[in-house]
Image: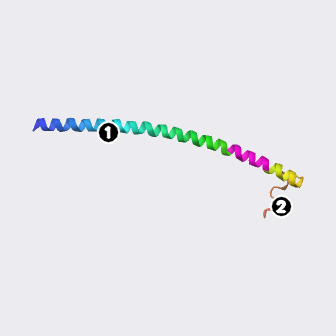
Amino acid sequence: MKELNLDERARTIKKLIEANEQLRGDLAREADRYVLLENKYKDLLLTQQQLAKENAKNEELVFGMTTGGNMSRYTGFLSDQQEF
């Protein structure tokens, strides 16, 4: 009876060790995946910010070329909250 309990205990410990190794491997893969996704997010954020700046510059340029005016003078010109 005692020998059976020790054998079962040894199997349980072996299963726990294998499960622990698997969890450590999963954790390492998820950490690598998180770092990769974080780097991709940073790259996309920088790209989006750069494109937003370029679009604002192009919008100002096109407005100036078509109307001959400065866009900052006309910002909010037709808004409802205009004060004279």
Q: Quadrant of the C terminus?
A: bottom right
Q: Which mark is residue 51?
A: none
Instruction: Give above or below for 18 relative to 54.
Output: above
Q: Is residue 8 magenta?
A: no
Q: What is the residue that sits farthest to the bottom in this orientation?
A: 80
User: Which contiguous range is marked in magenta?
Assistant: 49-58
Q: Is residue 39 left or right of residue 11?
A: right
Label 1: element kind: helix
Indicate the position of residue 69 as horizontal and vertical percent values: 88, 52
Indicate the position of residue 48 as horizontal and vertical percent values: 66, 46
Q: How is the image coloured?
A: rainbow
Identified by mark 1, the residue type is Ala
Label 2: element kind: loop
Q: Which mark is residue 19?
A: 1
Q: Earlier in the sequence, mark 2 or mark 1?
A: 1
User: To which residue does mark 2 refer?
Assistant: 83
